[in-house]
Amino acid sequence: GHGESGAHRPSTPRSQPSPPGLGRRPRHAHAREAAFPEASPEPSMAGDRAISIFKEDLDGSIEVAKAAAQRLGIVAVVLGRTGTVNDLVPYIAEKVKDPATPDEVLYRLAEQLDLVKLIGGLDPVLVAPLETLCVTEETLVRDAATKTINSIVEQASPAAVLEHLPPMINRLCGEGVWFTGRVSVCRILAAVYAKCEHASGGGEAVSELRKTLMKLCADESPMVRRAAAVAIGEVAAKAKDKAGVAPELRSALRGFASASTPATGQTEADSVRVLAVASLPAVAKASAGSSDGVAAINDLANELAHDKSWKIRSALATHLPAVASNVGSRAAAEYTPIFAKLQGDPEPEVGFVAAKSAGAMAAALPAADVGSTIAPHMTKLVVDMGYRSPQDRAMLAAVLVELLAHCDPRSEPAMRIVTEASQIISSTDESPFVRIQLIESSPKLVTAIGHQSSAARDVLAKLIRIMDTTSASAPSAAAEAQGADGMVANQKWCWRLRFVVSEVVSGPEFLDLGVDFYRDHLAPIVRMALVDPCMLVRVSAITGMGKWAAKYARATSTYGQWADENLVSTVVNLRNSADSKKSYLLQLTTAYALEVSAAHLSADGLSQLVGVVKDKDATSDIPNMRIAAARCLGRLHQHLDFQGNSAAQQMVTSTLQKLSADPDIDVKSMAQAALSNQRLPLTFPQWGPEGAPWVVKA
């Protein structure tokens, strides 16, 4: 097994005394009779046969027994309510006590014991095997058992939970029970606590459950204390009376923060304390309604920020944004100096974790604090080329751009972020990882500072310069083909940068800025991307044009001819240029553009592009060109509603019929498949499973 070590193990942990109630007839039996009616004599015979086979298989080889355990729910359905309660579950209860039963079988039985719906409610006979499984040595078995118990608690009535679960918890925490029982209690305590709060007369049980949690937090076993530290946050999150339970939970957290074990006075393990810090946000939310509680959380966070263990400070840096968010906006500002302390922590790992959390922290703090405390420090880290690895700095660059949404975009710190980001985007000395990340974040940057601002125009101009491969200073295709060394030497011209630029053009932030923004700033990028030497860049540009056409082609009368004036005219002009250069790869752009945007074109625009494909691509000397034409026109033939455009429809059909007699076998097969409505191969996977973004699955 994989059970925890470090605690004394009794000889047979599964051989605990049977819990009270095993085999008793359930209360309110008449209610379950209605939910699960008695079986007829024939199903009873089938049930006897089913349980007989089930028992035989469970005693068989390990593989057979595992398969049988997986069928527990099916056997229960065949047996019916009475057979399940009287025969099946008691047998399982005895089986799980048998030390010879393999852990793999126990695990599957624990998963399948959620039979509440089948037996009509939470029955004590169902508690017995789960209680035994909760003290098993194997961790995975206990996890499955506690997961099943939590599921049962969610389905059962508060009264049934109050009657059966608190006594089970007391037994698992009793003298002589192995520590595994107390670990399992920690994992089910929150669900049971919340349910008992809703039960009539559950006040005493709720009080006892709180005391149990406090005892578990001071348990002598570190495995139990780890589980209890997690349970603190779960109870805080699920409790109905948060104000009533919060003081005790804060006291328990402070006990973990003291760095000494309450039971022995020895130094507490960092693994336990880190989990306690993870529960701090939930306890902070439970304490938000009390000024004293908020002050206590603030003091505790400040104490943890000065802890001697860097692991504790790192955990606090991860969870402090959630703490600040949960205490309320008025109290959140008090966490600014704590976060500043973590940002400048002498342990590099703590400072890096705090930097990664800066975006979430900024969302909880006032804008003035973000601009004065977080933004300057983050800017310094991102521009420092010697800080950690390029991949780490790229991650922080994305966080840096997020800060613009949480501070005044006209402030000096915000303008510093924009200036540095713009310089990095155009810097050939900077790592391509950082540049790519900032290019991906450029739409957020432009929208945050206002797309009409001079700073935004500067960023967009630098994106255009990245796409320009016609400059005299641009390297040759051979230089770019050098691989990694060539990429480093000519980072500005790296195809990866151009690909990311072409991708962001059709991002949601830029799409929402409208067609005027496209015309003024993005159209030059698209035109250069369509003639890029890299195939991925060209396909990305074509895909992006399809997205713009889908959004604006027929949105209103103002934009009625947008696709014709932009997409169609651009593609036709580029096709004429490609023909003059006799560039086969650039000539394919026409068919691709038609295929991706056909549903968004006007009748004239559709006819114009179909005519180009018919007259040039379908008659090309290159078979691949004719295959592309057949696939494109076939997609239109099978899926496009021509809306009375008989001229375009006739051109599509006649061209496919001509290609169906093509001497090239591949061209011929493609055209024949299109005419016979067979499924056509995908042109590019990013266009969707149906072949084009506009195709609706039947």
Image (cartoon, grey):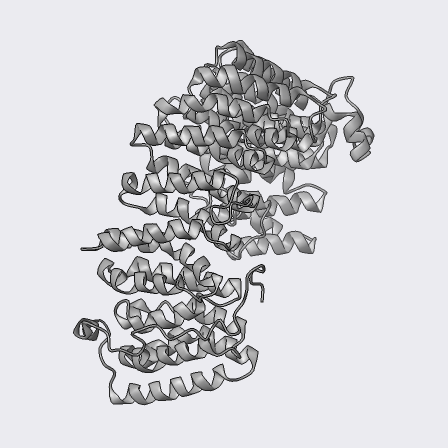
Question: Is residue 200 left or right of 104 when viewed as pictured?
Answer: left
- Using the rendered view, name the quadrant where residue 123 is placed: bottom left
Task: Report the residue at 41% width, 21% height from top.
Answer: 333
Q: Position of residue 588 (x, y in %)?
A: 65, 37
Q: Residue furthest front?
A: 265
- Residue 280 appears in the figure: yes
Q: Can you say whether 181 is above or below 26 in the image?
A: above
Task: Report the residue at 55% width, 21% height from top.
Answer: 522
Q: Can you say whether 665 is above or below 538 in the image?
A: below
Q: Can you say whether 669 is above or below 550 in the image?
A: below
Q: Position of residue 220 (x, y in %)?
A: 49, 54
Question: Is residue 430 left or right of 108 when viewed as pictured?
Answer: right
Q: Position of residue 370 (x, y in %)?
A: 48, 19
Residue placed most toward the observer, 565 or 204? 204
Q: Position of residue 299 (x, y in %)?
A: 43, 28
- Residue 530 appears in the figure: no
Badge count? 0
Residue placed most toward the observer, 265 or 660? 265
On-image quarter of the N terminus: bottom right
Task: Report the residue at 52% width, 42% height from top.
Answer: 260
Question: Is residue 78 left or right of 698 when viewed as pictured?
Answer: left
